[in-house]
Image (cartoon, coloured by chain):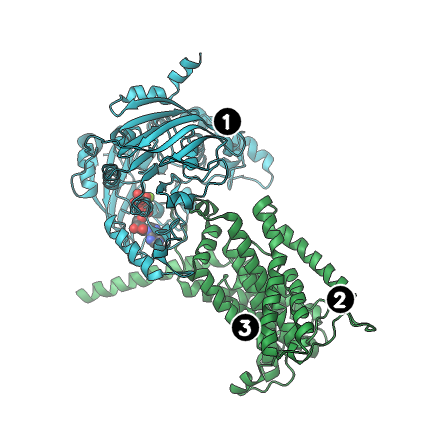
Chain colours: A cyan, B green
Amino acid sequence: MAEPAIELVGIDKRFGAVHANRDIHMLVEKGTIHGIIGENGAGKSTLMSILYGFYQADSGEIRINGVPVKIPDPNAAIGLGIGMVHQHFMLVENFTVLENVMLGVEGAPLLKNGIAKARAELKRLEREYQLDVDPDALIEELPVGLQQRVEILKALYRGAEILVLDEPTGVLTPPEADHLFRILEQLKDQGKTIVLITHKLREIMAVTDNVSVMRQGSVVATRKTDETTVEELAELMVGRRVLLRVKKGEAKPGEIKLSVEHLTVRDSRGVVMVDDASFSVRAGEIVGIAGVAGNGQSQLIETIAGIRTAVSGRVLLDGQVIDITGAADPGELRDRGLAHVPEDRHHMGLVLAFEEYENSILGYHDDPLYLRGPFLDIEAIQADARKKIEKYDIRPGDPRLKTANFSGGNQQKIVLAREMERDPGVLIIGQPTRGVDVGAIEFIHKRIIEMRDAGKAVLLVSVELDEIRSLSDRILVMFAGRIVGERDSDASEGELGLLMAGVEAKEAAE
Amino acid sequence: MSQPFAKLPAWADYGLLPLINLIVAFLVAGLVVMLVGESPIDAAVLMVKGAFGSGDGVGYTLYYATNFIFTGLCVAVAFHCGLFNIGGEGQAYIGGLGVTIVGLGLGNSLPWWLVFPLAILASALVGALWALIPAWLQAKRGSHVVITTIMFNFIAASIMVYLLVGVLKPLGSQAPETRVFGDGGQLPGLGWLLNIIGLDMRSAPLNISFLLALLAAFLVWLLIWRTKLGYEIRTMGFSPKAARYAGISELRIIIITMMISGALAGMMALNPIMGAQHRMQLDFVQGAGFVGIAVALMGRSHPVGIVLAAILFGMLYQGGAEIAFDMPNISRDMIVIIQGLVILFAGALEHMFRPSLQRIFQRVGRVKRETASVVTAGGGQ
Ligand SMILES: Nc1ncnc2c1ncn2[C@@H]1O[C@H](COP(=O)(O)OP(=O)(O)OP(=O)(O)O)[C@@H](O)[C@H]1O
Ligand SMILES: [Mg+2]
């Protein structure tokens, strides 16, 4: 057996009443890719934050290359050759790649020599690992996939031998994710050790050598990847059998609930983001919009939900025109039965600084149910929040807890509970399961299908092709702001992939 | 997303941290006092004695605090909406117009308890209107309120000078001030209140607008944390995107919040004008609008914190005046320096000691738990 790069011995960590890590023992072999999976809130990020010195374990020991170490802060972790790529990037947007990479390790009071050295070193790293990025490009002008590469370069530049990636593919398109995995393989071949946290079991199967499964703060199993299956891992994670693809019956489409006609939307810089889009959604059907992130899906649903304004076109809700060129009021649309689960739950769907119950009425705070005159009826709101917590199994089940302290999947459930429990006629959902564990995905998918079967019109946007294919009754593909095709739910992945890449669109244009 | 450091317990966040900041501020101020050749201990004793040692001392301290509560609340309400209203100074100054019109017009004919509510309304209204224009410019045109409210401070000052040397000045008078209001334009003092706790106030101008300030603090708490409007204000303050999503009109919320903020500043004018001088004098605000920023920062934008911070600054003003009077080497300007240091440490450098404190708390927490587990393990054997 190879020498272990990381040994975690009896790591324990509590946040108040929450026991985030319970007596964790984990062994990561040198020169391997080690996956960590587990439900939302299982304690994966906490464990890695302890390894990186963000948090201190209450008890337990960390050994790096067999030597017991103390890691009081991230600088100590870097000193020990541990690098971390966070889910939310920590880059200075208006700095260049080079400036970001050398930030904090400039080497000398005067930048000049440091820059030359850094540039040479960066060149070497790029050559060695095929991490091509223009060192003089501004971060804000790079797509997310490249920004992530800069994060990896930053870690390598600081001499990282161990690289921790916390849900790195959540924001990546499939080709970007594939490229990332090629880079990880390369790093592994050079003898680096990699810890990868992800919710996507396929990724675990594709790149890891070993995988540890966490549940409720404990490591419940560790497997060699080639000796396990997706089904076994899912069951280990959740503690019961999980349907990876939910069953659904025939759709019974009714009258048209939502129709979009020749909609064109520009962003603040005047770039056309949605280009002459037309489609409709009927009661009792799920229409999925597939597409690589950034092809106008976000702008499309935000316009329908009244958050953005359109340049031209019409949107009709129950046959009534929505004012989309002026300032449509999302509050009024809610009253008319349109619910919206936004893609960006951290900034739009939730106020992270609020307590859970305060978020449970966001957008519905005008409802007399929650008010007593001009005052909030806090007891009624909390009772209502408790009901939703129960029904959607939101954990921890405390409406007074700050929303930022819920794990990602539970935050998503807070939004879903709020929007679905209003029993809307039309439901628009953006990225319903981004960062959500398999058990919760199953739950969310079931709820979406229940909504459909109850006769609601559902418009679903997701960059996960699997999700689109398993939920949708009809699939629209968006490319460069245009709807380039419509397919049935049994369309093949390859066919949709080509459409998403704009192949047919280009041919049509020629 | 995980935070890099564990959160502090509430008592440390709201009690210990401000206390540490204060102590450091006073230590540095002590060095300054030493530099000019006076004893810092004597100065500290003088300050506390001056501020709390007598009925009049307390009266003055609370009189100043009244101003700072109003301006502190003004800044805090805007903070909760993510707006930085630096215009409290000008809004309070112009608010004086409302008080003066009511005081001059009705002071001779109505009793104070009828004049007072009208003066409250008038001062709040004028203050609110003065904040309306910057609010509208921010909401509609994106002109930053920090810039526009500063400019409006200057405009307010110029207007008031113009009025006070012109129409508002009695004929034949040399001083830039209005005539003294009639009896109905003069607020009763709070000597009786201090009497209850055994203090004897003779000349200090503490008056019932102090009680109005406390009431305003309570109402602000109610507004921010218990009403639908407050919910909308906080949503906007934390995340404008979430507010847009929730159907909260940015224009409406910014304008309402700024007007409430301006109204609070405007009401400050009641205290010096109707409560103390019984006439409007040039520059009666005396920087209270700016002190309000420090008070709001130090009080963490919470009404309880603001009342406490306002009393602290009242003490600095009153005690500082005593020091300047009794210590020949310390001039009025020195007092301003000391006040500045408190603002610097309690306001601007508020977070300087936070990371170290958090680290200490983490370590202490761990040691406690370890010893606890050792004890239980030992007991088991
Ligand atoms: N700073 C904190 N204060 C209080 N509780 C916290 C804090 N950080 C995390 N927790 C709690 O600790 C538990 C573990 O959280 P953690 O973020 O490690 O989960 P995770 O496995 O990374 O989940 P996800 O897959 O959703 O990212 C959760 O119940 C969470 O609510
Ligand atoms: Mg996590």
In the image shown, does B351 or A112 lie closer to the viewer? B351
Residue named by callout 1: A134
**Residue flagged by tag 3: what amino acid is it?**
Leu
Measured as percent of width and height from the top left, residue A472 is found at: 27, 30
Mark 1–mark 2 Cα distance, whole angstroms, equals: 65 Å
Q: CA distance from mark 3 to mark 1?
A: 63 Å
Left or right: B87 as drawn, with respect to B355: right
User: Is the residue marked by circle 3 packed among few (<14), some (14-19), or many (20+) residues within 10 Å?
Assistant: some
**Dot 2 surroundings within 10 Å: few (below 14), some, or many (20 or more)?**
some
Q: Chain of mark 2?
A: B
Residue A71 locus on image (x, y percent): 38, 49
Q: Work out whether residue B351 or residue B188 is closer to the camera in this orientation and state it.
A: B188
**Which residue is located at x 25 percent, y 62 percent?**
B373
Residue topped by disc 3: B212
Query: Which residue is tagged 2?
Result: B164
Mark in front: 3 vs 1:
3
